[in-house]
């Protein structure tokens, strides 16, 4: 190896130009008036290879469409491509080297035409100043390429050039809509996207009651919310850097709540404006969804620059839900009003939140008491089921016989979550469910269920009760409640959900004379399973609004007096036997 260092001795003073002495026809393909098409559908490495061939005169143009190696159709219209555009998109691979790449270069001519049509429709609604600014930027970007060197530029240089012009020729939203918001803090229009959020409550037995749900998240970048429909943020945040039009929310961590009923129609969307109240999926699937839309700015210009928010939180209205990260799933599809056209979102995120009763509250919220017609004993709720009564520190409960109950109940004001203020009882639970075995017929047996509210701070609207009992597969009639079977296993039907009849008893009032609802259930006997022994007639488990209720211990259940009638007969028989024995001994 020699010791010579430095640049080579002979260097080219100018770049090599292919066909330097040949006159080029400007009207042919590759000339000034008919430039070569943009390189699309390939990965970054293959694009650089094709651009090198164009630059140094090694590029061979297609004279007719080539055959695709996947669908075997003559749909390949770009040189050096082995797959057509449709097959490459379906397989999500490079059309030249078959490599799976997340970033495919360029856009198809069909996409460009569709975006151009959408842009023309949007420009009509923009201000004249913004429209001319955007048109000048588009004309500047669409000028013919003056040198072959521009063909080899990477996407990063193109983004830099677009950033300098402070405008972008086109931007698509998550719902294939685009809007312009003009701000005096910038000399050009800001491109935003519209984001639709839907809360689908897939839990079969639970619901959100007033003050309703609160959804929060953290933006991945410097996004702001320009406007909202169907919901609103609780705080606006610091928007001092904006002049003229002020955004709806500038916080990094916004919190969104549902709008109240009676909101003007121009601020509503489908499945909104119920005050945050969501039914369970088993009660009413139509009201188990809540939606809102927001217009987001400073999030990027394409679906590749938009980032999924982080740290989702859900309150209903207190804690209890833990949300996972947002995952990009298959885009949602929307059917038009005429049922003839289907549109598709550009991106769809799915966030799953799970509920834990232990995170929601430290103590249970309900308990169960039992009674029957064959036993005069009433089994109450276990003592201290939801907490113990503190006699040394008064004020943790309210005496129902006190003269001034109303003065003890605090004013909730604007607070979203108010802790329960319960009536003074041995169990100290806000809600008690009483199960009474009422009548035993020849072929049927009847049960009475009573739900009592001991909470002075809560009216339970659209409540539900889930009961597990092996005889629910033979439930014949419910008299004052709605019923629907819950079948977690295909072959076992031992669980049912009960809820109130609308406008009759679907509202469980606060503690007082009207703070209870009740109904009767009629079961048909099954000869192979029915019995009143060993507590079979009592439920295995009960849930109220999704919370597990405290059951009495099994050894305290009302027992069946099946041996009571045999006691006198047995004692009489023993006395007669003893008398006969004595007489026999005397005679002997």
Image (tube, helix red, strand yellow):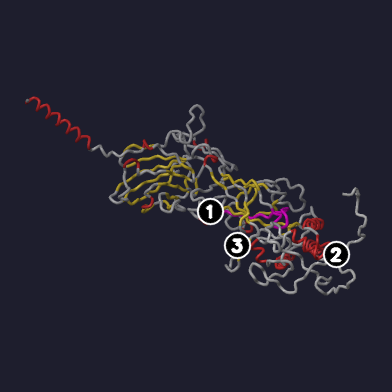
Could you say whether the residue bearing mark 1 is in a helix, strand or loop? loop
Q: Which residue is mark 3?
A: 334
Q: Position of residue 71 (x, y in %)?
A: 63, 69
Q: Nearer the viewer, mark 1 or mark 3?
A: 3
Does residue 50 appear to the left or right of 318 in the view shown?
right
| Front position in the image: 21 or 227 | 21
Q: Check residue 296 for magenta coloring.
A: yes
Tell me which label, 1 or 2, sits earlier in the chain.
Answer: 2
Q: Nearer the viewer, mark 1 or mark 2?
A: 2
Task: Tell me where the magenta segment starts and ends, as one range.
Answer: 288-306
Above or below, 225 relative to 364: below
Q: Which residue is mark 1?
A: 288
How far apart, in angstroms, are the residues tagged by discs 1 and 2?
60 Å
Q: What residue is drawn where x is 62% and y is 52%?
A: 327
Q: What residue is drawn where x is 51% and y is 50%?
A: 203
Tell me which label, 1 or 3, sits earlier in the chain.
Answer: 1
Q: Position of residue 16 (x, y in %)?
A: 88, 63
| Front position in the image: 367 or 470 | 470
């Amino acid at each position: 190896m020699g010791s010579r260092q430095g640049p080579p001795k002979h260097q080219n003073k100018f770049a090599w130009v292919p066909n330097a002495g040949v006159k080029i026809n400007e009207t042919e393909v590759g000339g000034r008036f008919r430039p070569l098409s943009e390189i699309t559908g390939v990965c970054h490495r293959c694009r650089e290879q094709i651009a090198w061939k164009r630059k140094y005169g090694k590029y061979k143009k297609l004279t007719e469409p080539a055959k695709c190696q996947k669908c075997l159709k003559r749909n390949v219209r770009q040189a050096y491509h082995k797959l057509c555009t449709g097959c490459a998109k379906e397989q999500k691979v490079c059309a030249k080297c078959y490599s799976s790449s997340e970033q495919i270069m360029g856009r198809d001519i069909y996409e460009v035409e569709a975006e151009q049509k959408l842009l023309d429709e949007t420009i009509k609604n923009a201000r004249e100043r913004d429209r001319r600014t955007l048109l000048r930027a588009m004309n500047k970007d669409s000028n013919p390429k003056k040198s072959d060197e521009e063909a080899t530029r990477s996407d990063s240089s193109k983004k830099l050039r677009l950033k300098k012009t402070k405008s972008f020729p086109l931007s698509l939203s998550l719902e294939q809509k685009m809007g312009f918001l003009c701000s005096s803090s910038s000399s050009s229009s800001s491109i935003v996207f519209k984001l639709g959020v839907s809360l689908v409550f897939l839990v079969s037995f639970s619901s959100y009651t007033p003050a309703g749900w609160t959804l929060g998240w953290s933006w991945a970048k410097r996004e702001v919310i320009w406007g909202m429909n169907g919901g609103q943020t609780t705080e606006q945040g610091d928007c001092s850097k904006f002049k003229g039009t002020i955004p709806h929310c500038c916080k990094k961590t916004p919190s969104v709540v549902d709008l109240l009923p009676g909101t003007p129609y121009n601020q509503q969307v489908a499945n909104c404006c119920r005050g945050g109240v969501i039914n369970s999926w088993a009660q009413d699937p139509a009201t188990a969804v809540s939606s809102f839309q927001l217009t987001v700015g400073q999030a990027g210009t394409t679906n590749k620059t938009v980032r999924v928010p982080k740290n989702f939180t859900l309150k209903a209205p207190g804690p209890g839900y833990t949300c996972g990260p947002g995952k990009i799933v298959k885009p949602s599809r929307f059917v038009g009003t005429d049922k003839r056209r289907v549109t598709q979102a550009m991106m769809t995120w799915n966030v799953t939140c799970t509920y834990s009763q232990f995170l929601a509250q430290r103590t249970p919220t309900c308990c169960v008491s039992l009674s029957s017609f064959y036993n005069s004993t009433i089994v109450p709720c276990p003592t201290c089921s939801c907490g113990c009564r503190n006699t040394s520190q008064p004020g943790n409960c309210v005496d129902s016989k006190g003269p001034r109950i109303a003065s003890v109940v605090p004013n909730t004001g604007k607070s979203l979550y108010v802790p329960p203020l319960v009536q003074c009882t041995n169990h100290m639970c806000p809600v008690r469910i009483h199960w009474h075995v009422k009548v035993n017929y020849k072929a049927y047996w009847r049960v009475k269920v009573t739900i009592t509210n001991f909470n002075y701070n809560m009216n339970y609207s659209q409540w539900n009760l889930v009961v597990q009992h092996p005889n629910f597969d033979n439930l014949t009639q419910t008299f004052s409640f709605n019923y629907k079977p819950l079948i977690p296993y295909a072959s076992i039907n031992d669980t049912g959900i009960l809820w109130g009849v609308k406008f009759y008893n679907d509202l469980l009032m606060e503690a007082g004379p009207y703070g209870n609802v009740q109904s009767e259930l009629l079961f048909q006997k099954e000869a192979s399973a029915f019995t009143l022994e060993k507590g079979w007639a009592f439920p295995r488990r009960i849930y109220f609004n999704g919370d597990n209720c405290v059951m009495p211990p099994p050894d305290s259940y009302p027992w069946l007096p099946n041996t009571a009638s045999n006691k006198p007969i047995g004692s009489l028989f023993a006395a007669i036997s003893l008398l006969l024995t004595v007489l026999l001994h005397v005679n002997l």
